[in-house]
């Protein structure tokens, strides 16, 4: 099982990050520890969206779609006011 997820930064000007992983809890902890993707370093993040996918190929495809679709990304960002607890 793979997860496609969206994180939102907890700063004054919030930004989003979309990724995929096999272990969601570990990946978010890495992002918050400054050991995740280069883009995410130096910020604190909260999980605002996730989807489960059966294969890595499906997860990569969905991640790419969400990253490139700014309308969908903004909709997810604005509609998901509460964060998830993992």
Image (tube, helix red, strand yellow):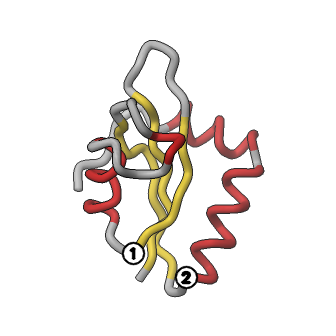
Q: Is residue 66 above or below residue 16?
A: below
Label 2 crowd bin: few (<14), some (14–19), many (20+), radius 10 Å: some
User: Is residue 76 left or right of 69 when viewed as pictured?
Assistant: left
Element type at mark 1:
loop
Q: Is residue 14 above or below residue 56?
A: above
The percent position of residue 46, horizontal first and vertical second, equals 35, 39
Element type at mark 2:
helix
Q: Residue at x 50, y 85 (%)?
A: 54
The quadrant of the rendering that contains the N terminus is: bottom left
Q: Residue at x 42, y 44 (%)?
A: 48
Disc 1 marks which residue?
A: 22
Q: Which mark is residue 56?
A: 2
Q: Is residue 65 above or below residue 21?
A: above
User: Is residue 27 left or right of 64 when viewed as pictured?
Assistant: left
State which tag comes first along the sequence, 1 or 2.
1
Q: Are marks 1 and 2 in contact (CB under 8 Å)?
A: no
Label 1 crowd bin: few (<14), some (14–19), many (20+), radius 10 Å: some
The quadrant of the rendering that contains the C terminus is: bottom left
Q: Tag count in the figure?
A: 2
The percent position of residue 44, horizontal first and vertical second, equals 34, 32
Of residues 82 and 86, the one drawn nearer to the viewer in this rendering: 86
Give the CA separation, mark 1 to mark 2: 8 Å
Outermost residue toward the top in this view: 12
């Amino acid at each position: 099982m793979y997860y496609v997820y969206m994180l939102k930064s907890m700063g004054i000007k919030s930004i989003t990050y979309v990724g995929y992983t096999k272990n969601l809890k570990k990946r978010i902890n890495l992002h918050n520890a400054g050991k995740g993707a280069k883009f995410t370093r130096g910020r604190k993040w909260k999980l605002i969206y996730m989807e489960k996918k059966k294969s890595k190929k499906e997860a990569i495809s969905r991640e790419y779609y969400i990253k490139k679709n700014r309308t969908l990304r903004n909709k997810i960002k604005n509609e998901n006011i509460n964060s998830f607890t993992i």
